[in-house]
């Protein structure tokens, strides 16, 4: 049987580590920190940051965005999301 690799999409590292400890099969899962990515974008409004974070989480849950995230596994950071654009001074998920 093949060993399936999992990815954990989270708001915080504590959350992801807790999830990794739920089962041995999640132990080596890749951790993708969505909140960190959004906080590093040039967005002044906290409400816009929260809305974008929620939109990204929903996008991933719907399994539309999992293959559209460029992730640096060595640094543990999201580098880019191909369906995320900047238009009219706002980030938009298309």
Image: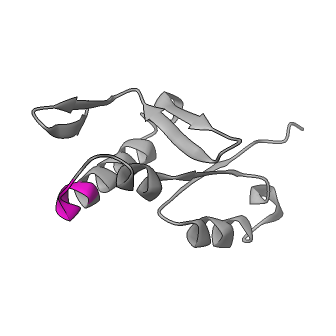
Q: Is residue 4 left or right of residue 11?
A: right
Q: Residue at x 47, y 63 (%)?
A: 11
Q: Residue at x 31, y 55 (%)?
A: 54
Quarter of the image with the C terminus is top left
Residue 32 covered by magenta stretch: no
In percent of width and height, residue 74 lies at 71, 42
Q: Is residue 4 left or right of residue 70?
A: right
In percent of width and height, residue 18 lies at 66, 73
User: Quick check: 11 above or below 56?
Assistant: below
In percent of width and height, residue 56 lies at 36, 47
Residue 47 covered by magenta stretch: yes
In percent of width and height, residue 30 lies at 68, 48
Q: Is residue 48 left or right of residue 53?
A: left
Q: Which residues are magenta?
A: 44-49
Q: Residue at x 62, y 37 (%)?
A: 72
Quarter of the image with the N terminus is top right
The residue nearer to you, when weighing 38 against 23, is: 38
Q: Residue at x 52, y 29 (%)?
A: 67
The residue nearer to you, when weighing 69 against 24, is: 69
User: Main SS type for the magenta part?
Assistant: helix
**Residue 59 found in image quarter:** top left
Q: Is residue 53 left or right of residue 6?
A: left
The residue nearer to you, when weighing 35 against 62, is: 35
Q: Which color scheme is applied?
A: one colour
User: Quick check: 42 above or below 12?
Assistant: above
């Amino acid at each position: 049987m093949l060993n399936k690799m999992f990815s954990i999409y989270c708001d915080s590292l504590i959350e992801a580590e807790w999830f990794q400890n739920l089962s041995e099969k999640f132990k080596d899962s890749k951790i993708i920190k969505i909140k960190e990515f959004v906080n590093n974008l040039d967005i002044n409004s906290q409400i816009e940051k929260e809305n974008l974070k929620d939109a990204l989480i929903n996008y991933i849950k719907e399994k539309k965005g999992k293959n559209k995230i460029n992730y640096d596994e060595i640094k543990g950071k999201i580098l880019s999301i191909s369906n995320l654009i900047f238009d009219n001074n706002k980030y938009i998920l298309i």
